Each structure stands twice: as C-alpha cells, then as structure tokens.
Amino acid sequence: MRRSLIGAAVLIVTVGTAPAAAARAATPALPNVVVPAPVSETANGATFTLTSSATIGTDAADVGNYLAAILRASTGYPIPVSAGGSGTIALSLSGAPSSVGTQGYQLTVTGTNVTVQANAAAGLFAGVQTLLQLLPPAIQSPTVASGPWTAPGGTVVDYPRFGHRGAMLDVARHFFTVSQVERYIDEIAHYKVNYFHLHLSDDQGWRIVINSWPNLATYGGSTEVGGGPGGYYTQADYSAIVAYAQARYITVIPEIDMPGHTNAALASYAQLNCSGKAPRLYTGTKVGFSSLCVPLDLTYTFIDQVVGELAALTPGPYIHIGGDEASSTTASDYSYFINRAQQIVAAHGKTVIGWHDIANAPLLASTVAQFWDTTTSNAPLASAVANGTKVVMSPANHAYLDMKYNRQTKLGQTWAGLVDVNTAYGWNPGAYLSGVGESSVLGVEAPLWTETIVTSADIDYMAFPRLPAIAELGWSPWSTHDVTAFDSRLGAQGPRWKVMGVNYYHSTQIAWPAGS
Ligand code: TNX
C-alpha cells in the first residue's frame, strides 16, 4: 500500500499531464512521519484541525485520559473525556478490522473527526501514538504552545510484525529513581514498545527490597559503578513502576541475574558463598567473576524466596533469570543450576526468560532465550530453537543502546562495535540468526546497560534516536524496510524530542529539521 502510494506520487511528477495521474494528484500520500512505519496508510486530502471545543469519547477511559492529558498540556484546551465512542476524537473498541489483532488499530482522520478503532485497549493506545505523530511536534509540548493543531486526513491500518517489542534499563550498574524510570517509560511508549525489562541486580548492586532477605537492598544496594550511593526500590516503588508501565500498555519484565553477576547478593549474605565468607561490595565494571554456590541447598531457598516475592509483585508473565556470562560457574554446575532455577520460576507461575547462554542447559518448553551476541550463528541456541525455544533478539552490534555511536561518543562502550542509527536499523530480526527463523522470533529488545550512564540526559542520549530504530524493526512489516525512508521519518521525530526535552544524539546520518 505505502509503496504503491509513493510510486503513484513519483508517477505524477514524471507524467504530470496524464488525466489518471492528475486524478491521483488530488489525493496526496500521508506524510512520511510515523515511527514505527505503519502497515498501510491512505490519504483522503482532508485536513483535521483540533480546536478548543474538541472532545474525546472513549471505550477505554485510561487511554482517553492519557491522550487528553497530552493534548491539554500543549493546546491549553479543556478536552473533556466521556465514555462511549462519540466525540471529536473517538476511541472505539468496535468496528476495527480483525486483521489488526489485539495490538493494532485503524485510525481515520477526516476534516471534522478522528476515529481510532481497535479490538483491545492496547490497540487504541497504539493508535493514539500514531495520531500524536500526525499532529504537529508542539502537540507533545509539556507547556502551552501555539497551533494550528492540524493533522492530514486519511486512514491508517496498522498492527505489529512481532508481539514483543522491548526496552531494557540496567538499574544495577547505576541506580535510577522511580521518576527517572517513569520518564524513560513515557519516552519508549511513543514508539509502541510493549515490554520494559528492568535489570534489577548485578555485581554492583541489588535494587529491590526482598523482605525475606533484607540485606540485599540495604547493603547490596548501597553502592554502584564508580562508588556512588546506589539505591533500591521498595516493593511499593516497584509496584508503582509496574502500574505506570501498565497504564501505557507496557509489561514489566523483572530480571534477577544468576548464577553469575551476583556479587551484590554474595556480599550481602556470607552464607550464600561456598566459602562461607562474604566478598566486598564491587564498584568496578568487570564481568564474569561471581557465582552463586551451585551445590548449596540454601542457594535454592534463596532463589525460591526472591522469585516468590518478585512474582507476587509482577502481573506480567515473565521473570528474567539472566544466566549470562557465568564464567566462574562450571558447565555442569551451570546446566544443573539453570534447570533448577527454571523449575522454581515455573512453580511461582511465571515463564522464564534468560540471556541466550541458557541454551547451554536443558530448557523448559516455555523458556524464552534472549540473544545478545555479535555473531549471526549460535549452535546451542539454534538447537534449542529446533526443539521449540522462542527467541527475543538483541544482537549487541545492532540493538545495544550502550554502544558508542562513533569514536567521539563520550558515553558508552565499544566491545560490540560502533552503532550509529543506520546500523541499529540495518538488520532483519526474523532472518538474522541461522536456524532462528521468523516464526521462532517473538520480537526484539533494545537493552541499555549503564556502566557509563548516570543521568536521564545520558539515557536519552543513548536511546534516541536508536531505540525508535529497534522499535520499528519490531513493529513494521519488513516490506517497509528502507533506510532512506526511515531516516526521513526519524528526522521528523527530532522536533518532538526537542519540545519534550529529550536529549537526543544528533546523528549526522539524519537530516534533522532546522531548529531541532
Ligand atoms: C554484556 S550482554 C553484559 C552486561 C554488560 C554489557 C555491556 C549481557 C547479557 N551481559 O553485563 O553490562 O555487556 O555492554
């Protein structure tokens, strides 16, 4: 659809006098501004203008209130919200094509009204994000700005290629407050991300209160990379993050990394160590030196209690058990450990995700592997996939938001290479790893490790503009994949980030509009 529209526009330019082309010229294509690219867009030539008398009618109160809050802040209009599908802007749970599934939507913009139709509220939320991107960038201003608030008329029918589109934040290497985390959740929600993975524990810090093991947070959380004060979430804080994400149709995936990356836990409880002696807290950035004590019974009591408390606080289906870089655990211990850890998570009613290293152990049928390496083949993972394991794709040389953009980038690392935005965009998640085809891929995740990341401005700088590239790979059909068109769409986001105060990296690969 999109391709043929663009094709038609080109035809008009080249054979502009032909009558058929002239008729098409009256119906311009929708502007190429929406990230992720929608499945199909058709223009109707009308222009919608949001005025001070605009209202929202909605079948999902939370989505209506979310949209109204954004529109009120920038326009200063009252934008009353009422239940049911009538209003200047109607958010309706009826009439959507079944093809859009539970996450997609149909958006119709006429000269007088906007209608978003979906089969589930998540689809309405996604449609609202598209609507915002069709309105001027200033619509996302947190303070009153000037219009006119116009959107081009047309119809968008849209749904995701993959059900799983994630972002990860490492709050262990550096701690980030609840409001910093919520700020990031707000930013990723604009790109139809629907999973937020919180890396809650590592060698340098344990970031959530576990009532049955209180020292984990109070001692294990008391520092971070570089020796700063660290911090931790109370269980109420964690629940607040979960609820904040849920209100944006994002499911939290909590990670407790094990058996490696556990120095903070081992430092908090001497009895968890095979030696019976607690190591010191660690504030460096090396990986692979720590391991839970695999032969010790108490290790499994510990995991059971930690996972039990976390599972009870987590409405989403997943618990992430890490499993990466366990280089001080022997292969047979690793296999034994991952097997038991999976049983424990399953006993608490949750599905396991682990970094792809877990494919070196026997996996439960439901366990999901998250690929993070820089290779395009991985034999243990391919054989797990042949046995039915599903994969989330985070190849570090494309999807890691902590890699430097170029040699001059002050923040970040280089072990997986330099990743500018076209490199982040330049891979196909469904045909990347040998033996891991489209039907074995649940989707993508863009992880942000924080060894060098300290502030929200740092998070913004590394995530934008790359996070939207990964989000687009997860959402948009492969038929829309076109780096030139993507770069142009992405450029259109610059003015939005500017008004929202997002400290994005002005990649030289993108023609950012003047002033952004
Ligand atoms: C590797 S990738 C790690 C993390 C580091 C990251 C830095 C993976 C599963 N583990 O522990 O923070 O590299 O880029």
Image: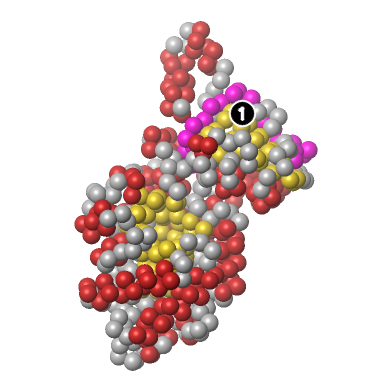
Image quadrant for the C terminus?
top right
Q: Amino acid at mark 1?
A: Gly
> With 403 as the anchor, is 232 left or right in this view?
right
Q: Is mark 1 within 8 Å of ligand 1?
A: no
Mark 1 lies on residue: 153
Can residue 122 be seen by looking at this rendering?
yes
Q: Residues within 10 Å of mark 1 (few under 14, many from 20)?
A: many
Q: What span is colored magenta in the figure?
A: 33-55
Does 180 sit above or below residue 277? above
Residue 300 part of the magenta segment: no
Residue 70, given in percent of the width and then of the height, sits at 66, 48
Residue 515, given in percent of the width and then of the height, sits at 55, 42
Secondary structure category for the residue under label 1: strand
Q: Quadrant of residue 363?
A: bottom left
State the residue at coordinates (38%, 80%).
300
Q: 65 or 223: which is nearer to us?
A: 65
> With 439 as the anchor, is 252 left or right in this view?
right
State the residue at coordinates (37%, 60%).
366
Q: 504 or 259: which is nearer to us?
A: 259
Does 360 sit above or below residue 462? below
